[in-house]
Image (tube, helix red, strand yellow):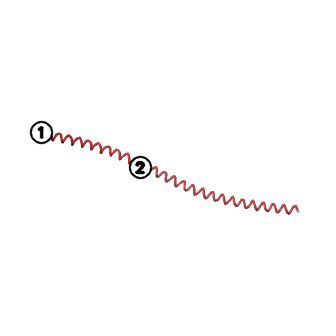
Amino acid sequence: MHPIREEEDDILARLETRLENVTGIITRLKDRNAELEAQLREALSAREAAETAAAEAQEEAVRMRSETEGLRSRQKQAATRIKTLLSQVEQMDLLTEG
């Protein structure tokens, strides 16, 4: 064969090999990109679920605090009423003993 022809064939073969390599790299990058996009969608979904759960927990905490404050208030009122009733009973006992 002619030396120039052999050199051209060699250059074309190397170019073909490089193009195949680039094609393989691009394919792998596209696959990896698709995987990363799927992971990102999952992460965003998980974050959204976590944010929803956190908001629900905060609402529940507010409700529980309000309920606790109401119960404490009722407990204080009951204690005051019991003290008043005890005081009245003690006064009645004093009046009957005398």
| Residue extending furthest toward the right | 98
Q: Locate residue 53 relative to residue 12 in the image: left or right.
A: right
Q: How crowded is mark 2: few (under 14 residues within 10 Å), some or many (20 or more)?
A: few
Closest to the camera, between mark 2 and mark 1, is: 1
Residue 73 horizontal/vertical position (percent): 67, 60
Q: Is mark 2 on a helix, strand or loop?
A: helix
Badge 1 is on which residue? Answer: 3
Q: Which residue appears at 13% of the width and 40% of the height?
A: 5
Q: What element carries label 1?
A: helix
Q: Locate residue 6 relative to residue 40 in the image: left or right.
A: left
Residue 46 horizontal/vertical position (percent): 46, 49
Q: Tell me the kind of residue under disc 2.
A: Arg
Q: Locate residue 23 relative to residue 46 in the image: left or right.
A: left
Question: 27 or 6, which is in the foreground?
Answer: 6
Q: Which residue appears at 14% of the width and 38% of the height?
A: 6
Image quarter hosting the C terminus: bottom right
Q: Tell me the kind of residue under disc 1.
A: Pro
User: How far apart are the alpha carbons under marks 2 and 1?
Assistant: 57 Å
Which of the 4 quarters of the picture holds residue 75? bottom right
| Residue extending furthest toward the left | 2
Residue 84 horizontal/vertical position (percent): 76, 62
Which of the 4 quarters of the picture holds residue 24? top left
Q: Which residue appears at 32% of the width and 43% of the height?
A: 28
Badge 2 is on which residue? Answer: 41
Q: Which mark is residue 54?
A: none
Question: 52 or 94, which is in the foreground?
Answer: 94
Q: Which residue appears at 38% of the width and 45% of the height?
A: 35
Q: Earlier in the sequence, mark 2 or mark 1?
A: 1
| Residue extending furthest toward the top | 1
